[in-house]
Image (cartoon, helix red, strand yellow):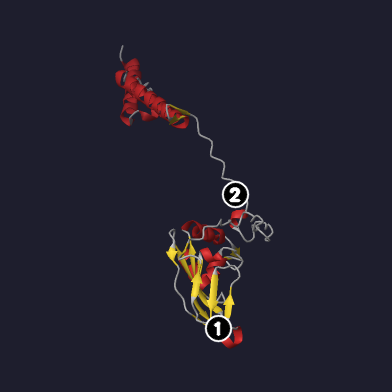
């Protein structure tokens, strides 16, 4: 702003006292204002953004940033930043000048402004137009202009946009599918269907062919014979012996 040779096109004094400017109106285009904000948005100092430190609050917006830059604490005079895309009338201003210290007249050699002892400000145009210069982001260098040398882009330490982006993770391999259905689902379904078919076939076979129980009958053992049967056998033997002795 200070060194621009065409600053009178977008800049106008609001008040002048003792030959010093106390306040100016600065007209910016929306394109330049947004570019200016975006170029400073990613500049950091430590873990904080620089614009948050300037605004003295988190989540600094463009409006808050311009207010902080023009409130007089960070500039030698008050700056009224106006964001607009249309020209605006140049504000009228009266100046207070010490004639004995400055002389009868102070004249700006470029012919843009003339300050006289009558404090009348005469400018070459009646309107100021929005300043629409190129706003360079922090990850790009600024080319040389006039006596200004070319500057390099900010480092990754101060500008997140200068950092190499982290490569995105590799996409997971797509599992094989058939007609849009994963093969694992199809295999699981076939195994279940096979198990169900075998289970059903077994029960149908058992239903149609019921098993017959042909269990062998074991002969009764001597221990299982009742005690009365043993006595009868003894009496029969005794009767047979007696008959053989006494009957002719």
How many callouts does the rendering have?
2
Let me know if residue 120 appears in the view. yes
Q: Quadrant of residue 110?
A: bottom right
Give the residue pinned by disc 1.
Answer: 18
Q: Quadrant of the C terminus?
A: top left
Q: Position of residue 223 (x, y in %)?
A: 39, 30
Front position in the image: 76 or 195: 76
Q: Position of residue 120 (x, y in %)?
A: 49, 77
Give the residue pinned by disc 2.
Answer: 166
Q: Quadrant of residue 148?
A: bottom right
Helix, strand or loop status at disc 1: loop
Above or below, comparing residue 63 to residue 233 in the picture: below
| Residue at the (50%, 80%) spot, across then down | 119
Q: Specify which label sits upstream in the sequence, 2 or 1.
A: 1
| Residue at the (53%, 68%) spot, across then down | 52
Above or below, comparing residue 66 to residue 145 in the picture: below
Q: Quadrant of the N terminus?
A: bottom right
| Residue at the (57%, 77%) spot, across then down | 76
Helix, strand or loop status at disc 2: loop
């Amino acid at each position: 702003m200070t060194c621009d040779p065409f600053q009178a096109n977008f800049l106008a004094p609001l008040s002048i006292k003792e030959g010093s400017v106390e306040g100016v109106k600065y007209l910016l285009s929306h394109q330049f204002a947004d570019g200016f904000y975006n170029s400073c948005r990613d500049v950091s100092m430590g873990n904080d953004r620089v614009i948050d430190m300037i605004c003295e609050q988190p989540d600094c917006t463009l409006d808050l940033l311009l207010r902080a830059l023009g409130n007089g604490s960070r500039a030698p005079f008050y700056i009224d930043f106006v964001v607009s895309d249309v020209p605006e009338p140049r504000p009228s201003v009266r100046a207070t000048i010490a004639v004995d210290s400055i002389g009868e007249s102070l004249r700006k050699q470029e012919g843009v402004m003339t300050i006289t002892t009558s404090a009348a400000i005469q400018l070459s145009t009646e309107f100021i137009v929005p300043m629409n210069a190129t706003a360079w982001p922090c990850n790009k260098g600024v080319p040389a202009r006039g006596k200004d040398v070319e500057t390099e882009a900010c480092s990754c330490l101060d500008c997140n946009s200068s950092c190499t982006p982290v490569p995105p993770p590799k996409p997971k391999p797509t599992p094989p599918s058939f007609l849009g259905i994963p093969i694992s689902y199809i295999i699981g379904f076939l195994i279940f269907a096979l198990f169900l078919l075998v289970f059903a076939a077994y029960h149908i076979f058992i239903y149609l062919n019921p098993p017959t129980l042909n269990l062998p009958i074991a002969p009764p053992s001597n221990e299982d014979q009742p005690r009365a049967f043993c006595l009868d056998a003894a009496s029969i033997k005794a009767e047979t012996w007696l008959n053989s002795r006494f009957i002719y």
